[in-house]
Amino acid sequence: MARLLRSATWELFPWRGYCSQKAKGELCRDFVEALKAVVGGSHVSTAAVVREQHGRDESVHRCEPPDAVVWPQNVEQGGVCVNLTHMDRILELNQEDFSVVVEPGVTRKALNAHLRDSGLWFPVDPGADASLCGMAATGASGTNAVRYGTMRDNVLNLEVVLPDGRLLHTAGRGRHFRKSAAGYNLTGLFVGSEGTLGLITATTLRLHPAPEATVAATCAFPSVQAAVDSTVHILQAAVPVARIEFLDEVMMDACNRYSKLNCLVAPTLFLEFHGSQQALEEQLQRTEEIVQQNGASDFSWAKEAEERSRLWTARHNAWYAALATRPGCKGYSTDVCVPISRLPEIVVQTKEDLNASGLTGSIVGHVGDGNFHCILLVNPDDAEELGRVKAFAEQLGRRALALHGTCTGEHGIGMGKRQLLQEEVGAVGVETMRQLKAVLDPQGLMNPGKVL
Amino acid sequence: MARLLRSATWELFPWRGYCSQKAKGELCRDFVEALKAVVGGSHVSTAAVVREQHGRDESVHRCEPPDAVVWPQNVEQGGVCVNLTHMDRILELNQEDFSVVVEPGVTRKALNAHLRDSGLWFPVDPGADASLCGMAATGASGTNAVRYGTMRDNVLNLEVVLPDGRLLHTAGRGRHFRKSAAGYNLTGLFVGSEGTLGLITATTLRLHPAPEATVAATCAFPSVQAAVDSTVHILQAAVPVARIEFLDEVMMDACNRYSKLNCLVAPTLFLEFHGSQQALEEQLQRTEEIVQQNGASDFSWAKEAEERSRLWTARHNAWYAALATRPGCKGYSTDVCVPISRLPEIVVQTKEDLNASGLTGSIVGHVGDGNFHCILLVNPDDAEELGRVKAFAEQLGRRALALHGTCTGEHGIGMGKRQLLQEEVGAVGVETMRQLKAVLDPQGLMNPGKVL
């Protein structure tokens, strides 16, 4: 990457702007030849199918293909829509030190497969089999965060190609200690910066002992309040719950249909516990007492791996289950996070807003962190409906802010929540972030238009 | 603070430089009058005893009194040597959300006393009864970090007076959520910045459920290697140990004498476990098996509060125990942190270096994090000995760096480790930190000369 960035900085990143100045086809040809000269002809593609694949995601947003896709093989190359999946080595595993260094092509599942016989695992799990460096760049979290923390808690070091091509090791080259008081926390600054400060080309992760035993459970509640109260009581009782997920009755209905479950259609918690057999017994007993005090019914443990896997597959397929309820529509997912005591009121308000707006939506969330997602279904060709969906998402963000929360617990700011970010951190907060962006990326080359 | 900073910025902070331009006494009088006009006469002192009190600490460094001491009462005031202890309110306790907001005058013990009946506590414990905002500024950790993390993991939000007097809320005013993906992690940038980026005037902390039961233990080992191997095995077995502290035989001897303990003079682990009675039984059993496999002897549990308190008081008084072995001398404490697998070799090397240098020193450390302190005794009037102590500390820092560690796990860079910081994070790392400092504090007003 460094070579490309150094030789052709401003031409590379503001690509669309540059192309628009002249006849596009001609300029692209010159530029693509320049790219091929650096990374080799077989690592550059302008094929429509490839470009479309890199401009599409699961969201409602329309496909925005880049003009070219480049696969660098090492940090000396790079540029444009930089696809780092060809850098896919697990560089270093330090079992005794509970750490590992991975390149951007290594995914969460690939790492855990590699760790299978080591007695260790990497717990941060956003559902999808994401790139671990991508998870660092977006500050990912997910279902296990309540116990094991988010990427912010589990990244020990980053290798970053800075906008001017220099290579930064945020905690020093090759270092992988548990804690440090040496200078500013550069690692923390780059985790969650959404690609706006540099390209993350390697991540050193903290690993955890693989759980000795695992039990999952589901339980249905008479109300959202009862489900959330149970969560608070479980946390207060210091039960080290590994996952505690809330699904509203709309989502439970969708999951029953899509994943052939037979659960009660009611506000429901999916739980998972990790520990020794003996510790699990106690965790299960305490949890069962708490949820029953809160009126839970249809309470069932899943101790066998197969049954557990069926439950969590259903949870991870919630997105597709929601999509299946209105075929032909796209999903629009938004997330917020509030202090846990405010969760019942915001979930209830959100359900009222949904009804009032006439939109189709369901709620699923990492309730132990006060974080939930609202998945809305929308016909992307219906501009009026899309407008209502966006207004609803903005209203939800503002509700979270009013309750001392954040407009996004894990999805990030991107382009859609830049206004909400200003409202969240205030003028001085945004100005400080702008100062950091300006000093680290003075030409605004990295992921332009995002976050700020 | 804001008012003083805005009205007289450059006069305030580079105080010594400014005074040296004219007859010092005269200028100070003018300046002190200016300070009094802002904060009131009774909140400014130039008395020698007060100035000396603010220029002295536990270290070997000579007393460097400031020219004046100012106690602001709110964030609208401030300047010079800013003593924030008069801002000592616990502003907000959110029990259900496990969070609290404190001003700089609130110490760790004062907060935990306040929390006594809430079922919650704040676990980060650097030993001293430090200011919580000061602990945030220095990124403190200490004995409980192995289980509960450091300040980096437990600060949710900061109120900061920036060098130009503006007020920044790093996560937005009044916010106290568990996680967020909204923009750059400003909180993480200010935690551990050692006062060089702004004045922390309030901190929102994450609280934890108070442990239901607590057991402490000590066990002696035939070697450093055996003690550290036990630590790794305990962590690998996922025993959620709350504290695991290493003391070498020199330190055990000093503690026996100073704190009237009767422990074996050998490499020793001090442990503490938190949990339910039932969970504790299992933790104790597993730990006992592991340490016995590693040749531990003189193994003893302390289940009673009084006996536990005696042990941990002895551990926290290790500094004074070391000082007492050579009356009239000062202590010089340095710390490093390495990947845990490298801990035995660096401790053994360090003990050899100590013997070779003819210095008096002992080792005590947060071994679960790979972090340890070396406490050296030195006659501050003996320049030659002081020189040997500094050379030894620098050599220890370099040893840690060579083993992929950090030159400071928790003490920070200050002025003494600026060269080691360069070696640790490299030219690009230091340059990036300098850029951040320059953009946030362009006049270099905040804690000048520190870190960079």
Image: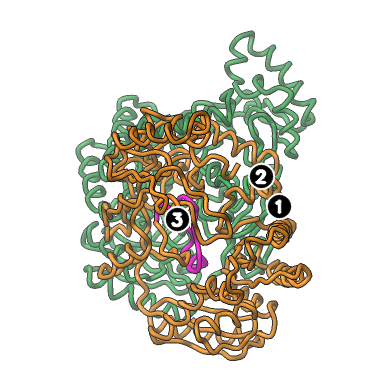
Chain colours: A green, B orange
Q: Do the residues indicated by labels 3 and 1 lie within the same chain of the protein? A: no
Q: Chain of mark 3?
A: B
Front label number (3 vs 2): 3
Q: Position of residue A122 (x, y in %)?
A: 57, 60
Is residue A448 at all visible to an observer of this figure? yes
Please state which of residues A180 and A240 is positioned toward the viewer in this rendering: A180
* C-beta proximity under 8 Å, tags 3 and 2: no
Quadrant in which residue B278 is drawn: bottom left
What residue does disc 1 label?
A174
Q: Is residue A363 magenta?
A: no
Residue A169's disc is: 2
Quadrant in which residue A411 is drawn: top left
Which residue is at 67% across, 23% downward?
A: A9
Q: Amino acid at mark 2?
A: His
Q: Which residues are magenta?
A: B132-150
Q: Is residue B148 magenta?
A: yes
What residue does disc 3 label?
B135
Which residue is at 58% across, 19% downward?
A: A16
Quote the CA–CA distance across marks 1 and 2. 8 Å
* Count of residue discs: 3
Is residue B158 at all visible to an observer of this figure? no
Please state which of residues A442 and B133 is positioned toward the viewer in this rendering: B133
Q: Amino acid at mark 3?
A: Met
Which quarter of the rendering shows the C terminus of chain A? Answer: top left
Please tell me how crowded label 1 is: few (under 14), some (14-19), or many (20+) other residues with Cα within 10 Å: many
Q: Amino acid at mark 1?
A: Gly
Q: Chain of mark 2?
A: A
